[in-house]
Amino acid sequence: MTTKDLNIRFDEAVAVAAEMTQASLPQDVQLRLYANYKQATFGTIQYQNNSGFDLRNAFKTNAWMQISHLTPDQAKENYIEIINAIVNQK
């Protein structure tokens, strides 16, 4: 499979996810989608310690850090798999 095919499938999965509401997804799934999207589009997180504490952002940062070993292409595949699993459950 070529990178172009992967990018097309990823873009399609992102479009499907954009149609979903947050209320329709468990929070752990939201965090996995967020982390894989960030890893796929921005690469490995560059952690910066902030003096302010925001629990929501801490969970998001932690989720992203947990998959920072993945390549962007691996993260795209994970994202696509998660979206496909959600769609196939309906």
Image: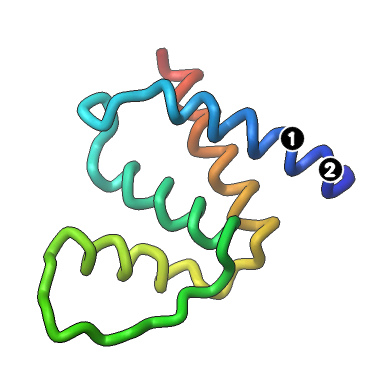
x and y percentages locating residue 60 in the rendered image: 29, 61
Q: Residues within 10 Å of mark 1 (few under 14, many from 20)?
A: few
CA distance separating discs 2 and 1: 6 Å
Q: How is the image coloured?
A: rainbow
Name the image quarter holding residue 39.
bottom right
x and y percentages locating residue 31 in the rendered image: 33, 51
Query: Is disc 2 placed on a helix, strand or loop?
Result: helix
Residue drawn at x 26%, y 24% is 24
In the rendered image, the quadrant that contains the C terminus is top left
x and y percentages locating residue 78 in the rendered image: 57, 48
Q: Nearer the viewer, residue 29 or 44?
A: 44
Q: Nearer the viewer, residue 56 or 82?
A: 56
Residue drawn at x 51%, y 24% is 16
Residue type indicated by callout 2: Lys
Q: Residue furthest right?
A: 2
Residue type indicated by callout 1: Ile
Number of the label disc, if any, that sits on residue 8: 1
**Image height of 37 relative to 64, above or below:** above
Residue drawn at x 42%, y 21% is 19
Contact (Cβ within 8 Å) of mark 2 with mark 1: yes
Q: Nearer the viewer, residue 82 or 40?
A: 40
Query: Is disc 1 placed on a helix, strand or loop?
Result: helix
x and y percentages locating residue 87 in the rendered image: 48, 20
**Image height of 87 relative to 69, above or below:** above
Q: Residue furthest top?
A: 90
Residue drawn at x 76%, y 42% is 6
In the rendered image, the quadrant that contains the N terminus is top right
Image side of residue 57 versus residue 45, left or right:
left
Name the image quarter holding residue 43.
bottom right
**Image height of 64 relative to 8, above or below:** below
Number of the label disc, if any, that sits on residue 76: none
Pointer 2: what residue?
4
